[in-house]
């Protein structure tokens, strides 16, 4: 099958970009989902490890002594106690999440950058406009993807619960979905959505804004072409900033989503994200908000690298313009 350009104004307006089907809304959406799925599968064990570390030592939820483990010991413990495949426990709802989250965040960011806030005449995009676009795209995308995130977090903790002799809460993604709706109604699917949206806003401020800005700065300062090396350097910057900004909100989100609820869907440990934030700091200290930072950073760097290089490469193969 041969694809032809949808719009071509090259002959009528010299210097104007030529767009084809690969620059369309739905093609960009699909490419975003594919690139995110590749990155998610490759780095998912670090996400599971991060989640276990963030719940570990949760004083507010239990008076039982906790065996503290670092990132490597947690990962080895999961393999030894539950099996190697458990490192990918919860990957299915994680992929479902990216069908919504990654597609929306990329197309909404590009829409705001190219059609709403607009670039400067020289093609540069001011960092304040990039920050607004990154935050807004993260908020919109995560709000719609929050139910999948809730299901993922609950599934990730099931292996640990069973090892501790506690009864299973959910058996699969479908069972978790039905259980949440039956107990708390459709609104229950958005439990923890506030800290989740806050985290997404910060992560996208770090990821999208940093990647876009770093790419412009590196190209301008070094003269590097739009290449794999440029994508690699930009994504490394994006991963570090995103992990630093997003980890505290990620800890709060994970704890709020993982807590048990009463018959009305109200949390039994935390009243909300602020209550979780204050209790965590009071009981465990400020740096408890950075539990799981190392796996978050180690995961986000290769995730960001894999996503952006896959995303840019697929777009290039299809004939689309660079991000």
Image (spheres, rainbow, N blue to C red):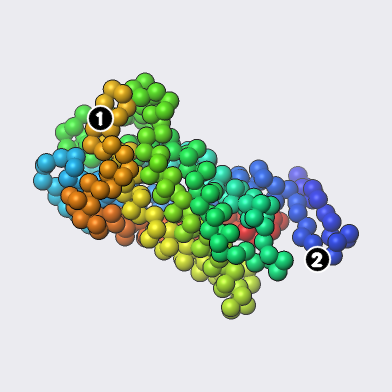
Left or right: 147 in relation to 3: left
Q: Position of residue 204 (x, y in %)?
A: 48, 54
Q: Image point 17% across, 37% down: which residue?
A: 164
The quadrant the N terminus occupies is: top right
Mark 1, Cα crowd under 10 Å, few <14 / some 14-19 / many 20+, is few
Q: Quadrant of residue 60?
A: top left
Work out whether residue 60 or residue 132 is closer to the camera in this orientation and state it: 132
Q: Quadrant of residue 12?
A: bottom right
- The reply to whether callout 2 and callout 1 are in contact (CB within 8 Å) is no
Work out whether residue 105 or residue 321 is closer to the camera in this orientation and state it: 105
**Which label lies toward us, 2 or 1?**
2
Q: Position of residue 313 (x, y in %)?
A: 61, 58
Q: Image point 61% across, 45% down: which residue?
A: 29
Number of marks in the rendered image: 2
Q: Image point 18% across, 32% down: which residue?
A: 166
Q: Image point 46% across, 51% down: which residue?
A: 201
Q: Position of residue 312 (x, y in %)?
A: 60, 58
Residue at the spot of label 2: 15
Q: Against 117, is 260 above or below? A: above
Residue 217 makes an appearance in the image: yes
SS assignment at label 2: loop
Q: Against 190, is 113 above or below? A: below
Q: CA distance from mark 2 to mark 1?
A: 61 Å
The quadrant the C terminus occupies is: bottom right
Question: What label sits on residue 308 in the rendered view?
Answer: none
Q: Position of residue 170 (x, y in %)?
A: 31, 29
Residue at the spot of label 1: 168
SS assignment at label 1: loop
């Amino acid at each position: 099958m041969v694809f032809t350009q949808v719009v071509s104004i090259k002959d009528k307006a010299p210097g104007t970009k030529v767009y084809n089907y690969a620059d369309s809304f739905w093609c960009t959406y699909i490419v975003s989902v594919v690139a995110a799925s590749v990155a998610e599968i490759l780095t998912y064990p670090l996400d599971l490890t991060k989640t276990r570390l963030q719940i570990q030592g949760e004083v507010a939820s239990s008076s039982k002594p906790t065996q503290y483990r670092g990132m490597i010991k947690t990962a080895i413990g999961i393999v030894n106690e539950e099996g190697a495949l458990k490192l990918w426990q919860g990957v299915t709802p994680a992929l479902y999440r990216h069908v919504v989250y990654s597609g929306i965040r990329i197309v909404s960011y590009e829409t705001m950058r190219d059609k709403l806030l607009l670039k400067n005449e020289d093609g540069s995009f001011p960092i304040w406009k990039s920050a607004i676009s990154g935050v807004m795209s993260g908020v919109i995308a995560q709000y719609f993807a929050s139910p999948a995130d809730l299901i993922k977090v609950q599934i990730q903790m099931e292996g640990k619960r069973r090892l501790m002799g506690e009864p299973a809460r959910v058996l699969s993604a479908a069972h978790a979905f039905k259980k949440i709706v039956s107990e708390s109604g459709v609104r229950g699917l958005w439990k923890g959505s506030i800290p989740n949206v806050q985290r997404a806003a910060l992560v996208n401020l770090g990821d999208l804004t940093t990647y876009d800005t770093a790419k412009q700065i590196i190209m301008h300062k070094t003269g590097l072409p739009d290449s794999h090396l440029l994508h690699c350097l930009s994504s490394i910057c994006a991963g570090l900033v995103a992990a630093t900004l997003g980890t505290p909100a990620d800890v709060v989100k994970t704890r709020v989503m993982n807590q048990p609820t009463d018959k009305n869907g109200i949390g039994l440990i935390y009243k909300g994200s602020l209550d979780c934030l204050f209790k965590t700091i009071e009981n465990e200290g400020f740096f408890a908000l950075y539990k799981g930072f190392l796996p978050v950073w180690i995961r986000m760097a290769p995730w960001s690298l894999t996503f952006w290089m896959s995303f840019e490469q697929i777009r290039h193969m299809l004939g689309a313009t660079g991000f």
